[in-house]
Image (spheres, grey):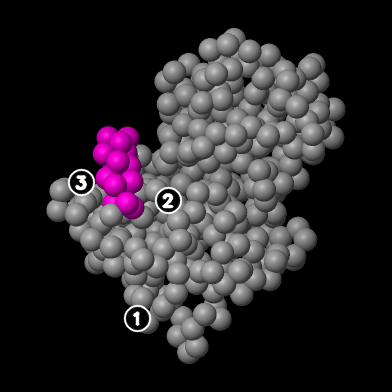
Amino acid sequence: MKKILKTTLGSAAIAIASLAISGIATSAAQAGELNVVSWGGAYTASQMKAYHKPYTSKTGTKINSIDYSGGLAEMRAQTEANNVTWDVVDVVISDAITGCDEGMFRPIDIDKEMAKAPDGTPASKDFLDGTLQSECFVPLIIYSTVFAYRSDAWSGKKPTSINDVFDLKKFPGKRALQKSPVNNLEWALLADGVPLAKIYDVLDTDEGKDRAFAKLDTIKENVIWWTEGAIPPQLLADKEAVFGTGYNGRWFSAIAEEKQPFSMLWSGQVLDIDGYVVSAKSKNLDEAMKFLKFATDTQRLADQAKYISYGPARKSSGPMVSKHAELGIDMAPHMPTAYADQGFLTNFKWWADNADEMKERFAAWLLQ
């Protein structure tokens, strides 16, 4: 796991929206309140149970939970207008790095300002190796984008690897893929026989790029393209697709909570890191930092794993992962970190250098 997590990380989130939960407006937080921004759905629900409610009980501070769809546009707009209303924001690592470089997020002294492990280990040594990619970023969870499939779609045979996603003869049916070159190009190369460790070496060549698109060509007519994370589980539930890519937490929710006849295919999972940043111009900076220290301690990260299948980013939290708070099932086997050797981490530096070219080529390819 340590070896894998040392790989450069990141994936850019797209589409911006800021919607308030339960009618809460995004006006500047008053004294005794914090505006905490995250991704919504089951993920935000897990944070509210593990972080927000315990913090409010402890301090009396009200947490206004706000949904968004990622990206930095709203944060930039607030910063440029000198009217920052978001205090703490859940971001992917690539946005944390960019926002920190642009001065939107407050630098954090991880050992002085964040909680030690229960045994006294400094925070910088307790967070999983490779997760502290920005001085403004405190990791929360390890998640993955992974394939799932309808377990009743084919009689007598089940997919076992990423190769099966590209085998229309053996496993016929529609595939639900995100409308983006990110991950899809990597999966195509994996299915074409490229080893996990060599994906970006191959993709960095013109021949490798051609090879990835050629492999995608083999299933293109059987793909339904999605842009919102809630769509692939619904497509499988409606039997419009037999395979789908999505965030492992959403698949867990569909399987364990909604009892959908889906199974996970951990082969080729794309691991990533998610965490908190604090707005540099927050009007509640002191309170935001207190919340950050509380929310990212060992107990809180372990507690979140009781509600959703994302691996805690602290080493000391791992052994504390227990059963689902409501379902009573052991959560450890549902963590993407348990199958890290079957997946890889997005190479953020490669995509930073090649994203524009690949997005343009992907858009043109879709029209062919």
> Does residue 320 appear to the left or right of 21 in the view shown?
left
The reply to whether the C-beta atoms of the residues labelled 2 and 3 are less than 8 Å apart is no
Q: Is residue 185 above or below residue 150?
A: above
Up/down of 355 relative to 364, above or below: above
Q: Which residue is mark 2?
A: 179
Tell me how far mark 3 sits from mark 1, CA to CA: 30 Å
Q: Which residues are magenta?
A: 352-367
- Badge 2 density bin: few <14, some 14–19, many ≥20, Cα 10 Å: some
Return the residue at label 3: 204
Left or right of 188 in this view: 222? right
Badge 1 element: loop
Task: Nearest to the eye among marks 2 and 3: give it.
Answer: 2
Numbered tag placed on residue 301 in the rendering: none
Q: Nearer the viewer, residue 352 or 131?
A: 352
Instruction: Please name the residue that numbered disc 1 is placed on.
Output: 169
Question: Split into 4 quadrants, where in the image is the N terminus?
Answer: bottom left
Q: Is residue 148 left or right of residue 328?
A: left
Q: Nearer the viewer, mark 3 or mark 1?
A: 1
Q: Earlier in the sequence, mark 2 or mark 1?
A: 1
Name the amino acid, label 3: Asp
Residue 354 is inside the magenta segment: yes
Give the image location of residue 43, x and y in percent.
Answer: 65, 47
Query: Which of pointers 2 and 3 lies earlier in the amino acid sequence?
Result: 2
State yes or no: discs 2 and 1 in contact (Cβ < 8 Å): no
Q: CA distance from mark 2 to mark 1?
A: 24 Å
What crowding class fits label 1: few (fewer than 14 Cα within 10 Å), some (14-19), or many (20 or more)? few
> What kind of residue is marked 1?
Lys
Name the residue nearer the viewer: 185 or 213: 213
